[in-house]
Image (cartoon, helix red, strand yellow):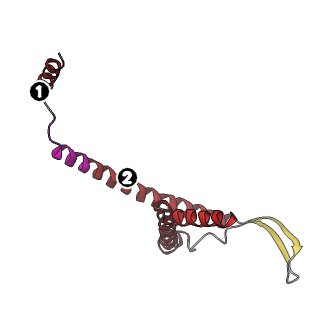
C-alpha cells in the first residue's frame, strides 16, 4: 500500500516538474537573476560614476553620523565610535530606485508589445472571419423551420 502511494507521489511530482508553470517559473527566476546582474552593473558602472563625478566619491559608504565617540573597545583594543551608516542606506536606496526604474521600463515595453500583438490578432481574426448570415437569411430560416414543424 505504501509502495503504491510513493509511486503516485513520484508520478505527481514528475508531472509537477514537467508542467509548463514550473518551467516558466524556473525561466523567470533565471532571467530575474540575469536582469539583477545587469542592473547592478548599470548602477555601479554608470550611475555611481556620475555620483563620483558630482560628489568626488564613487559611493556614499563613507557618509556616517557619529552618535557617540569611544563607545567600546574594538577587537584590536582601540576605542570605537557609535555611528549611523547613512551612506550605506543611500547606496541601497539608489540601487532600489534604479532597479525599480529599469523594471518599470521593461514592463512598460512588454505591455506595449502585448497590446500591439492583441490588436494585430484582433484585426487578423476580423479579416479571416467569414461574415455571418444576414438578418433576412436568419428570418427566412426561422420561417422555413416554422413551416416544417406545422
Image side of residue 48 versus residue 76, left or right: left
The label nearer to you, 1 versus 2, is: 1
Q: Nearer the viewer, residue 122 or 44?
A: 122
User: Quarter-wise, where is residue 81 in the image?
Assistant: bottom right
Other-residue count near label 1 (Cα within 10 Å), few / some / many at <14 / 14–19 / ≥20? few
Q: What residue did someone put label 2 on?
A: 111
User: Quarter-wise, where is residue 93 in the image?
Assistant: bottom right
Q: Nearer the viewer, residue 95 or 77?
A: 95
Q: Is residue 124 magenta?
A: yes
Residue 138 percent location from the top left of the image:
15, 26
Name the quarter where the C terminus is drawn: top left
* Distance Cα–Cα, label 1 vs label 2: 42 Å
Measured along the vertical axis of the image, is residue 38 above or below residue 103? below
Q: Nearer the viewer, residue 1 or 88?
A: 1
Which disc number belongs to residue 137?
A: 1
Image side of residue 114 versus residue 63, left or right: left
Which disc number belongs to residue 13?
A: none
Residue that appears at 20% across and 49% down: 124
Highlighted range, magenta? 120-132
Measured along the vertical axis of the image, is residue 112 above or below residue 39? above
Q: Earlier in the sequence, mark 1 or mark 2?
A: 2
Residue that appears at 37% across and 52% down: 111
Residue 136 percent location from the top left of the image:
10, 24
Amino acid at each position: 500500500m505504501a509502495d503504491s502511494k510513493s509511486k503516485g507521489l513520484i508520478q505527481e511530482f514528475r508531472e509537477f516538474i514537467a508542467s509548463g508553470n514550473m518551467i516558466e517559473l524556473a525561466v523567470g527566476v533565471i532571467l530575474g537573476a540575469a536582469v539583477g546582474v545587469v542592473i547592478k552593473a548599470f548602477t555601479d558602472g554608470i550611475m555611481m560614476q556620475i555620483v563620483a563625478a558630482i560628489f568626488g566619491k564613487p559611493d556614499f559608504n563613507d557618509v556616517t553620523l557619529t552618535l557617540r565617540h569611544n563607545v567600546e573597545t574594538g577587537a584590536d583594543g582601540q576605542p570605537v565610535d557609535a555611528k549611523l551608516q547613512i551612506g550605506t542606506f543611500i547606496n541601497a536606496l539608489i540601487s532600489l530606485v534604479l532597479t525599480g526604474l529599469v523594471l518599470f521600463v521593461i514592463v512598460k515595453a512588454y505591455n506595449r508589445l502585448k497590446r500591439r500583438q492583441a490588436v494585430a490578432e484582433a484585426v487578423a481574426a476580423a479579416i479571416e472571419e467569414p461574415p455571418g448570415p444576414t438578418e433576412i437569411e436568419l428570418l427566412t430560416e426561422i420561417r422555413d423551420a416554422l413551416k416544417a414543424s406545422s
